[in-house]
Amino acid sequence: MAILFAVVARGTTILAKHAWCGGNFLEVTEQILAKIPSENNKLTYSHGSYLFHYICHDRIIYLCITDDDFERSRAFSFLSEVKKRFQTTYGSRAQTALPYAMNSEFSSTLAAQMKHHSDPRGSDRVTETQMQVDDLKGIMVRNIDLVAQRGEKLELLIDKTENLVDSSVTFKTTSRNLARAMCMKNLKLTIVIVLVCLVVLYIIVSAACGGLTWHSCDPGWLRSDQIRSLRNTEGNKYQVNNCTASVARALLADLRAPVTVINARSTNLMDDSAANQL
């Protein structure tokens, strides 16, 4: 549901317009404008599955076309806002302006307001409710038959292909953003799971290694024990070597003692022999 077409005109002279999608809006609008009286009035025309809402003020007509299920309060809220902006911008110049004199400037305003009021979230619900209570009671809905120049019945033909293309682009963009959001969510979940697994693994290893500091599994402690063991071994070897050296010296002393005695005896014998010879 959206506002399909909007126009600001003086009688049948179009001053500014904007179409939400393709269609024979101008042909139909010319028929509608020709049927609107010049006095100040608000009215809704019904034609097939479409509604034509308009506000006429000081001979300036503010008209929009919507689907028949579009809320009338939103349509007239849109027209009231367009009227206020148009009068503030152009004032009395609209009474003598040439056809499409304001289209280049005011068409963008129409487009922005159409988008704003077509979105249910963008329109002011309080303003719409007040409009519905105060104004819609006096706004009639009339059926209207449109007749083309050739005499056959004129139907409003709308081509929403352009809008469908825009919708498909919007859908692709939304899908891509959704996929990106899901990937980020899965990535965050994976990171959380990995962190939890690491914490659990750390707790298990800590329990097996004698505590959170891993004393019994620390390679530094193993090296210290090995160093102490090697030191003890070297000390034992040193003690053994000292003991062996002491024993050797004692044996050597024992061996030297008889030699000294023998030498002494030999000396005494030699002295006795020399004395006898004398």
Image: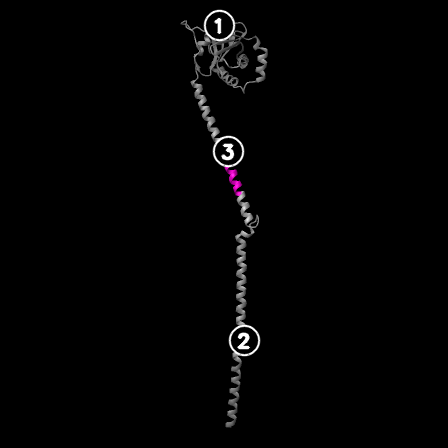
| Residue occupied by mark 1 | 35
10 Å neighbourhood of mark 2: few (<14), some, or many (≥20)?
few
Q: What type is the residue that disc 3 sits on?
A: Lys
Q: Nearer the viewer, residue 213 or 8?
A: 213
Say if mark 3 contacts mark 2, CB within 8 Å: no
The quarter of the displayed image where residue 199 is located: top right
What is the distance, in whole Å, between disc 1 and disc 2 at their CAs? 145 Å
* Extent of the magenta region: 185-198
What is the distance, in whole Å, between disc 3 and disc 1 at their CAs? 59 Å
Q: What residue lies at 52% left-to-right and 43% top-to-bottom?
A: 198
Q: Nearer the viewer, residue 237 or 77?
A: 237
> Which numbered disc covers residue 185?
3
Q: Main secondary structure of the magenta part?
A: helix
Of the two numbered discs 3 and 2 on the same chain, state the one appearing first in sequence.
Answer: 3
Compared with 196, 30 (above or below) is: above
Residue 230, given in percent of the width and then of the height, sits at: 52, 61
Q: What residue lies at 53% left-to-right and 58% top-to-bottom?
A: 227
The quarter of the displayed image where residue 85 is located: top right
10 Å neighbourhood of mark 1: few (<14), some, or many (≥20)?
few
Q: What type is the residue that disc 1 sits on?
A: Lys
Q: What type is the residue that disc 2 sits on?
A: Ala
- In the rendered structure, the answer to whether residue 167 lies left or right of residue 134 reads left
Q: Residue furthest bottom?
A: 278
Of the two numbered discs 1 and 2 on the same chain, state the one appearing first in sequence.
Answer: 1
